[in-house]
Amino acid sequence: AVTGSLRVRDTRGNKLLRDQESRVDSESLEELPARDWISFVVVYTMIFFNGCCFTAVVPSVPFYLEVLGAAPSFLGWVVSFYSLGQIVGSPTAGFLADKLSSKKMLTMSSTLGFISSTMYTVAPNHWFILASRFLTGISAGTEFTTELAYIARNTTATERTTFLASVTAVNVVGFIMGPALTTVLATLDFTIFGLAVNKYTGPGWLLVIMFLVDIIMVQTLFKDTGNTAGRDDASEASGLLNGKGSNSKPNGYGSLNVSGDKSTDGESTEAGLDEPPPPLTVIAALIFIQFSFMCSWSVLETITSPLASDEFNWHVQECNLLFTFGGLVSLLAYVAFVVASKWVQDRYLILYALVVCFIGLMLMIDWTKLLWFPEWIYLPPYVNRFVAGYMTMNAGFMTGRPVTFALYSKLVPSQYQGKYLGWMVAGGSAARTLGPFAAVFLYYGIPGLGNNLLVLFGSEALFQLACLVLVVLSWKHLLPAGGEKRFDDDRSTTSSESKGQISMHIGKRS
């Protein structure tokens, strides 16, 4: 065995000398079953389809509801109920993870998705659409959690960073391809066996096909693996969602500190347990910032199609294209963020994201329709400004959401992670549920030409300004312990060093 003495000098000058065994990460050496790459292909294909589930429907669902005779405000219920279904589905999957195999869980979730998508295509009224989207949300939440649990069981801690990054990338590609595929389906208009296939029902049929493929793949190609001894699937799935494994240190982007180790200070688990939580004002500020990002995004995805229809006379095809290009911008912004996060502190990235989102919201307001706007000020056509604002918002959101979550986790000591991260998740869920209602209420309920857009996007812009003020006021608290040193070391070497001065004397092999 390799042994050594670890001498630590903390920032207050106190010295602590302790002898401990230096061991290679046990998880990286543990005996895992031979990896079945075909099953991994099945899982990643389902993750891709999961990403399509939402964006394939959103551009066209306002027009579908109109055909079915729903009031414009009913759109808020439909969009919110999908998110509500995900909130129900994710903890349900966590509860059943120890009782059912992954194969059974994936079969159940895909079957539910197949049924709910079929309901969407044959809906006789708008209430069927509401029920369909809620059940599809449950299916998506259950399936995604199960997939992450499977990946956690079948990868080591050292591999998990790569697998997590690929999960996010595949999911984002699904967001892009959802509206891109329905753009093709929007050109179809025929009836087969009495079932209509057109620009309204096309997204539903796409999901029916995807869920049917899921069921076939799971039954014929997917091979489940039993739980590895001593490992908890639910906690592993949570760790993967948080960007790390059960025993690993946080890793780069999206790393949520859920173990005893601290990525930024290198102190031992015992030392980390003595750390107090950050001030509640900082916790509240970051939760509010995350709420603001999520609320602005849910407002945008809800109201974009109705607004484009009213202002530019766009229909399903044009809205699908807009969402597709917005997804491409999101993917590029995500890649840029992953690269920048290695060199730029999280608090600067949050500032950048807030400014970008504020600019995007300002561009989407039609200032020329406001009676008090000076006529001598020239602005490009509103359609150009709206599209530019929409793309800008996509870029800002894809940076702001993950970096806020990552920084929040780094600031919270390990023993407080469960409670504090629960607050953050609850804030995001509330935003995704309340945002669509706010969108339809403000857009359809504010009288006066152009006033609705001013109130809708202007109120969201005020949220961004308030967040900027909170960041500035909390600036000194938004740097994890040892953060400056870590970025200096990243530029010269590779990983973060500990807070204080650490000297390690490795003994000889016995």
Image (tube, rainbow, N blue to C red):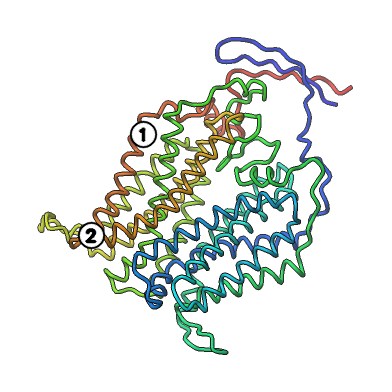
Q: Residue at x 55, y 15 (%)?
A: 11
Q: Residue at x 35, y 31 (%)?
A: 472
View extreme (right): residue: 510
Q: x and y percent of residue 322 in the render?
A: 40, 67
Q: How dense is the environment of label 2, judged by Cα within 10 Å: few (below 14), some, or many (20 and up)? A: many
Which residue is tagged 2? 366
Question: Disc number at residue 470?
Answer: 1
Residue sitting nearer the eye, 337 or 144: 144
Q: Residue at x 59, y 65 (%)?
A: 49
Q: x and y percent of residue 454 in the render?
A: 24, 54
Q: Amino acid at mark 2?
A: Asp
User: In which quadrant of the rendered image does the C terminus lie?
Assistant: top right
In the displayed structure, does residue 214 sit left or right of residue 482? right
**Residue 318 visible, this orientation:** no
Q: Are marks 1 and 2 in contact (CB under 8 Å)?
A: no
Q: Secondary structure at mark 1?
A: helix
Q: Secondary structure at mark 2?
A: loop
- Measured in 3D between alpha carbons, the distance from the residue under mark 1 to the one under mark 2, in whole angstroms, is 28 Å
Q: Earlier in the sequence, mark 1 or mark 2?
A: 2
